[in-house]
Amino acid sequence: MKLKTGDKVVVIAGKDKGKEGKIIKTLRAENRVIVEGVNMMTKHIKPTGQEAGRIATMEAPIDASNVMIVDPKTKKGTRIGHTTNKEGKKIRVSRKSNEKLD
């Protein structure tokens, strides 16, 4: 998976197609990511001794193939490539604009 926590992504498939958000968590074993404000689900929480019961909304995981990283220059979805810098370290770059991704 080429995506990291903190990357700004756009959803390219599913009910939230077109929405943008930041990756909160990556689940590498399942090839899924949790994106802020995308794929919201409701969860019923039972009352406990200290808290009352409630209905909470939270983000559910979405498949990593359904999101694309946002190009810093064009502000549209792009694929990710890799290249090496002057020190020989591998860095991620945008395929559209060849800009370095953090």
Image (cartoon, grey):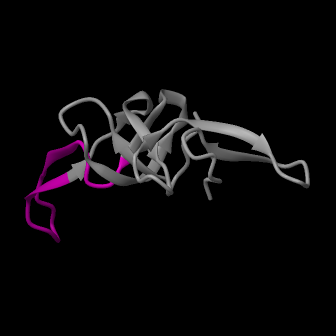
- On the rendered structure, is 96 left or right of 41? right
- On the rendered structure, is 79 left or right of 33? right
**In terms of depth relative to the viewer, which is nearer, 25 or 11?**
11
- On the rendered structure, is 101 left or right of 91? left
Image position, residue 15 (x, y; %): 18, 34
Q: Which residues are magenta?
A: 35-57
Which picture quadrant has residue 62? Answer: top left
Image position, residue 2 (x, y; %): 59, 37
- On the rendered structure, is 59 left or right of 81? left
Image position, residue 99 (x, y; %): 62, 52
**In terms of depth relative to the viewer, which is nearer, 37 or 93?**
93
Which residue is pictured at 47% across the width and 28% down the height?
30
Which picture quadrant has residue 83? Answer: top right
Residue extending farthest right: 87
**In terms of depth relative to the viewer, which is nearer, 57 or 14?**
14
In the rendered structure, does residue 52 fall within the stretch colored magenta?
yes
Image position, residue 48 (x, y; %): 15, 61
Residue extending farthest bottom: 50
Q: Quadrant of the N terminus?
A: top right
**In terms of depth relative to the viewer, which is nearer, 34 or 12?**
12
Which residue is pictured at 91% across the width and 55% down the height?
87
In the rendered structure, does residue 30 fall within the stretch colored magenta?
no
Total label count?
0
